[in-house]
Amino acid sequence: MLRSIGLMFMAAPLFGQAAAADLLTAKTTARLAAFDLSFDGVIGVAAIDLKTGRQLCHHCETWFPTASTIKVPLLVEVTRLIRAGKLPYDQPVPVRKEEVVLASTAYERATAASGSLTVRELITIMIQNSDNSATNKLIDLVGGMAAVNTRMDEMNLPGIRLRRKMIDLPAAKADRENIATPLEMARLAEMLYSNKVLDPASSRDILNFMGLVEGDVRKTVTPVRTATKTGSLDGVKCEFGIVWLDHRPFALAVYGAYLGNESPVPGVTQILLDHFRKLDRSNAVGRYLE
């Protein structure tokens, strides 16, 4: 009996104590906060451990301008119509010179040549080249911005809002900026990873398009596989997506506003990579196994 009581007292301190992984999360969160303070502007960061679902958050529920990362929520609605047979990948779509807006090199070339692009070509240049005219054309094809926001609501992602077309400066001046929280963008990436966006084939298709992007995340984590979307506006830099570490893949969303010339994405990505690499090579209590 006394031996049993002794064992109970020996075990008791283990309960209610922080795990080593909790301490690591707290330390990484502190690193993110210190990085934010050292940086010109403000940042919001969300990361999700795709093995455990645990989250890292630094201002992750704050609204930020999405810049071109909003093109992935649009792609979700485009893909829904493709799966429904309403918008085939190979359907040709007329393109006209008067539709061309800034940062639309691929779209402009098409208007001078064939005069049309297929839906697949529009998607590819929207994601890989961040072509803004292709984006605006796809917004029209899905029935407007409300269709995208309805899809996000149905996915329980109300923090993601498409409120203007690309390069619509009057809308931006009227504070109709496209916005999202880092946490909900990271959750969208998590849903893509888990094949929960529409259906498994749709999730894989979207990630394949995102895999074409060569942004700051990929440059930081090379040679690790990534699927992301970048975004950039005056004073704004952002990127979100997935990093496939062997044993600890993670979703991340990095958003910055009021910035100078430097992007926060490489520095934040390195902090998150350091964190998840430790988890990737260790057991549950922090012993390295490799």
Image (tube, rainbow, N blue to C red):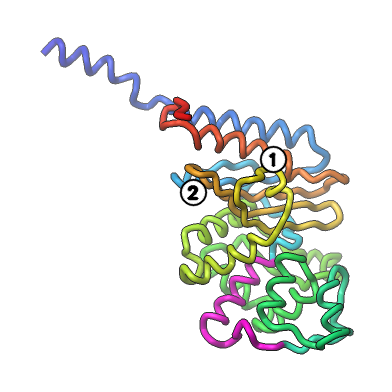
Residue 218 at x, y percent in the picture: 68, 49
Q: Quadrant of the rendered structure where residue 71 is? A: bottom right
Near-viewer residue (88 or 34): 88
SS assignment at label 1:
helix
Neighbourhood count class around disc 1 (C-alpha, 10 Å): few under 14, some 14–19, many 20 upward: many
Amino acid type for the residue under numbered disc 1: Val
Quadrant (top left, top right, bottom left, bottom right) of the N terminus: top left
SS assignment at label 2:
loop
Identity of the residue drawn at 72% across and 59% down: 66
Total numbered badges shown on the rendered structure: 2
Q: CA distance from mark 2 to mark 1?
A: 18 Å
The residues colored magenta run 71-92
Residue 262 at x, y percent in the picture: 84, 44
Residue 238 at x, y percent in the picture: 73, 52
Residue bearing the label numbered 2: 50
Amino acid type for the residue under numbered disc 2: Leu
Q: Is residue 151 left or right of residue 260?
A: left
Neighbourhood count class around disc 2 (C-alpha, 10 Å): few under 14, some 14–19, many 20 upward: many
The relative height of residue 113 versus residue 243 in the rendered view (above or below) is: below
Identity of the residue drawn at 73% across and 57% down: 230
Near-viewer residue (30 or 204): 204
Q: Quadrant of the rendered structure where residue 133 is? A: bottom right
Residue bearing the label numbered 1: 268
Q: Residue furthest left?
A: 1
Near-viewer residue (86 or 17): 86
